[in-house]
Amino acid sequence: MIQLNRNYTLPEREDDIIPIKVIGIGGAGSNVLDRVVLDGMDQADLIAANTDVQSLASSVAAAKVQLGRSITHGLGTGGDPELGFTSACESGDEIRAALSDARLIFICAGLGGGTGSGAGPVIAQSAREMGALVIVFATMPFSFEGKRRAAQAQEALGRFHQLADAVVCFENDRMGDMVAPKAGIHQAFAVADMTISQSLRSIVNLIQRPGILRIGFDDLLAALRGGGGRCLFGYGESDSDNRAHEALAQALKNPLMDRGRMLGEASRVLVQVAGGPAMTLSEVEILMRELNKHISEHTQLLFGTAVDGRMGARLSVTLISSLACETDERPVQNFVPVESFAPPPADPIVPAPEPEIAVVQEAEPEIEPAAAAPVVEREQVLQVEPTPSIQSLVPGDQVTESEMVEAEPEPAPEKTPPRIIPPKKKPVVAQKAGPEQISPKSESVVGKPKQEKSVAAKQEVLQFEPLTRGRFEKSEPTIVEGQDLDVPTFLRKNVRVK
Amino acid sequence: MGNNDLMVGLEIGTSKICVVVGESRPDGTTKILGVGQAPSRGVRKGEIVDFETAMKCVHEAVVDAEQKSDVMIRSVYVGVAGAHIQSFNNRGCVVLPDDRDEIDEEDIEDVKISAREVSIPAQNAFLHSIIQHYHVDGQDGILNPIGMLGQKLEADFHIIHGVRTRIQNTIRCVKELPLEVEDVVFTALASAQVILTQQQKNLGALVIDMGGGTTDYILYVDGAVRQSGAVGVGGDHITNDISMGLRIPMARAEKLKIEEGSVILGNCLPGETVVLKDDSGFAGKEIERETLNTIIHLRVRETFELLKRTLDEESFINYVGEGIFITGGCSLLQGIDHLAEEIFEIPARVARAQTMSGLTSAFQNPQLSTAIGLIKYAQAVQADRPQRRGLTRIFSRFIPGMR
């Protein structure tokens, strides 16, 4: 302790602290806040906002705002975003009072329910109007929570994208991948909360920590601004002999990082290396050299380093980046589980005003593969508008339905590579991409010559979606020039075999 | 110890562990006494991932070698591989004191030390520093400056280094057996010792050792090592690709690769198929030959192209007079030399060890070239400085004879 005092302490540091507030909205939001408190956060004020008084009372946040006092009367919203929205509007003044004087506001919300999805965007707007920088940490529901919730979450996410400076989106499905299959559901949720808390704290640290090479708001924003895409985030810490290496490895292991595989596609990556006074330049150098293997040559590195006496012998690495919007070609190249990507392409594929069967069009090849990937060779994908009027347009609709039931399991074992595409994928795509997926047999039922032509065009862009590493799944990846060489070459080059 | 002339090379590979026992003869040649092998487990991409299992396998291989050669193995030369191994060239410089202008051995030591005064990552250790050329007062291409007059002695070294802990893991694995480790040698350097003659090294040659888990390479120009390194891709990857592409188990894929695989495309009849035999002998799945070859071709092509890009940084292609020598287990793939020729645009051939006597069948097998190379390496070390034997230090060496 005495030794620490002899180390650098910057006198002006106290003045330098940027007022930061973290607001957790709804049940999921306050869970995250609780986790943040547990993990320790002294550089930001925490505020819980909820419609449900019971949940609000159990929150450990210092400040609390009850939303919609006269609307929900202290109960929850029952999963209705409308109710959440009006509640937040009613309590607008209280929200503004709670958020005042902050320069940076983090909003944590679980999307898909009523309060997070409904009240969240209102609060984001208030925060923005007060001139603060707004970063949203949104949690997307598990896919097993149902389509309705997913749709609500998607809509709220879209609003957040419009309102906030940056949106960091956590998909619960991906968190689930990190938890052992035997673990209880509470544990899966806890993992999600922990990841968010960790990300939040490291961003706060990143900004508050006096740096030799300082990372500012501008850098943070530049890294996060990706047009509403996927946020990559990694944080690692180590105090071993080989700490530079281990800290980076840990950062890349973060569920939002996908082992650094997606870093290759990011255009900007923010890196902060922080350590105690014993941190050496060569350690930073090693770390950066290793990191450079994961990013492409054109990536802009926003690099910062900070010395913090409190770190002791530990060295930490924070990586923040974002990928461009999901709807433009990305789904295919990103090596992520399908289900997390299925919702976004669904919307553009089914254009709302078109009163006909939406046959796959050449004009949108980038969107297509995501939905069409599992469909092989002779299979056709027809997107039928889910409105009742269209169903009446389709002749022999019932036949199609019944055909589909028996046709669907059949092509799967033969045409879909079992080790490459998880079996659950098929139903997901069938649900999301369009109501019907029609096999060659049913072609005769609906078939028109015009459709056959468009099918041929579609096949050119057929691509494999998730890339797996087979035998090397558990070994250290061999990444050269931004490519994971453990993934079969034919998959990476999208060469069709068989 | 007793018999100084006994030399044992041990290669802990990704697919198998080889122990080659050799004997140095008074006339300078080496005789292979026996070869021990064991399938390798617990090794991925040339690095030990399961210590206990790997140790058992090494033990098996050593016992096998002892039985076949009828000697007792006490100490070994160990080959190390892995994508962590890197290299670079550096020049050291020493200025002689004013009152002396004859270069002696001490100056050679000093210049070597000065060449090593470069920063390698903190967790890395030097594996080899190989002399390329000396320069005396600006005069190039001097091979042995001892006794020459001059004021300034410079030396170009090729320095190979790797992650310390990973190299130590390999050493520990052997020491626990217990066996003594005489030296650790980068596998490509060892392979090159038996594959290339001095003349080929002088003319310039590239050795590609494509093993189970890694592909190592070493480039000789003007008789000296110019570039070396390793890529963490090897035969295992090909097998994995086949297994995933054709959806067959790994063991089946491995067999298919060895028995039917080829890197040449468009060489088979349209629709030609290979029938996968069931374990019971019944015909099982039919696989299109072209599909199989495409998978292999893409992987090997990619690996070669990656190597070419790495080597092209110094536009080496003009210096390679003898062409490419491919060795290691993957060199048994049909047509791999043609593919290398196509990509590197210089002649390529599959090379085997050919310069020793004894168990001649061993030389025919490119899978053994590294282990045999280790013996050749050992022989060169022992011949060069018999008086200093035992002083061999594992991480700081300088072997004038090893070029």
Image (cartoon, grey):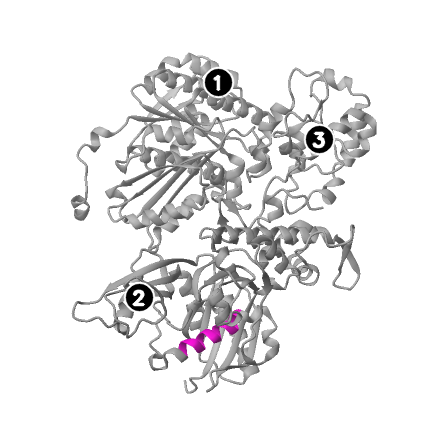
> With A234 as the anchor, is B297 left or right in this view?
right
What amino acid is found at the position of numbered circle 2 in the picture? Lys
Residue A51: image location, x then y, percent = 44, 20
- The amino acid at mark 3 is Ala
Compare residues A85 and B301 and report the one nearer the observer. B301
Q: Are marks 3 and 1 in contact (CB under 8 Å)?
A: no
Q: Is residue A491 above or below residue A169?
A: below
Q: Is residue B57 visible?
A: no
Using the image as rendered, state which of residue A395 and residue A37 is in the foreground: A395
Q: Is residue A328 left or right of residue A215?
A: right
Q: Identify the residue under disc 1.
A: A84
**Quadrant location, the N terminus of chain B:** bottom left
Pointer 2 local density, CA inside 10 Å: few below 14, some 14–19, many at least 20: many
Left or right side of B86 for A471: right
Question: Image quarter for residue A405?
Answer: top right
For label 3, the residue is: A457
Magenta segment includes B377 = yes
Q: Chain of mark 1?
A: A
Q: Amino acid at mark 1?
A: Gly
Above or below — where is A362 with respect to B228? above
**Would residue A219 be seen by someone viewing this image from the given angle?**
yes
Label 3, secondary structure: give it: helix
B157 shown above or below A11 = below
Mark 3–mark 2 Cα distance, whole angstroms, equals 64 Å
Where residue A246 appears, as percent x and y from the top left, is: 39, 50
Q: Residue furthest right?
A: A444
In the image, which residues are magenta?
B370-382
Mark 2 chain = B
Residue A412: quarter of image: top right
Q: Which mark is residue B112?
A: 2
